[in-house]
């Protein structure tokens, strides 16, 4: 499995509750925080939900 790094680049303040929960499920709490996940369809779908709040790179 490939790895993907996800970085929170924008705040979740004034965003819908489902986007806040998605960020929490990804393990992102602070701006600038980086987490690493496997490149699975579930994770890619979650990233797509909050693509305007995060940046991604391949690890």
Image: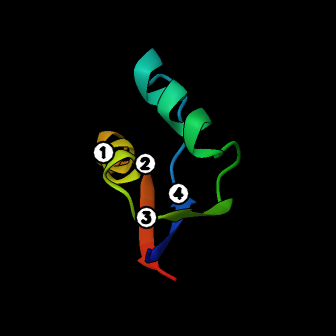
Whichever of callouts 3 and 1 sits on the residue coming sooner in the sequence is 1
Q: Secondary structure at mark 4?
A: loop
Whichever of callouts 4 and 2 sits on the residue coming sooner in the sequence is 4
- Across and down, in percent, residue 25 comes to 57, 36
| Residue at the image position 31 percent from the left and 39 percent from the top | 49
| Residue at the image position 30 percent from the left and 52 percent from the top | 41
- Across and down, in percent, residue 22 comes to 48, 33
Residue linked to disc 2: 53
Looking at the image, residue 53 sits to the left or right of residue 27; the answer is left
Numbered disc in front, either 3 or 4: 3
Residue linked to disc 1: 45
Task: Report if the CB atoms under discs 2 and 1 are less than 8 Å apart.
Answer: no
Whichever of callouts 2 and 1 sits on the residue coming sooner in the sequence is 1
Q: Secondary structure at mark 1?
A: helix
Q: Secondary structure at mark 3?
A: strand
Residue linked to disc 4: 9
C-alpha span from label 2 to label 3: 7 Å
Task: Report if the CB atoms under discs 2 and 3 are less than 8 Å apart.
Answer: no
Task: Report if the CB atoms under discs 4 and 2 are less than 8 Å apart.
Answer: yes
C-alpha span from label 3 to label 1: 14 Å
| Residue at the image position 46 percent from the left and 16 percent from the top | 17
Most extreme residue toward the bottom, as rendered? 59
Numbered disc in front, either 3 or 1: 1
- Within-10-Å neighbours for mark 1: few <14, some 14–19, many 20+: few
Foreground pick, 12 / 26: 26
Residue linked to disc 3: 55
C-alpha span from label 2 to label 1: 14 Å
Relative height, residue 18 to residue 36 (above, below): above
């Amino acid at each position: 499995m490939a790895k993907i790094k996800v970085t929170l680049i924008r705040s979740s303040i004034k965003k819908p509750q489902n986007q806040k929960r998605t960020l929490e499920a990804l393990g992102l709490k602070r701006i600038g925080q980086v987490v690493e996940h496997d490149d699975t369809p579930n994770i890619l779908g979650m990233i797509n939900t909050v693509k305007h709040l995060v940046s991604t790179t391949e690890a």
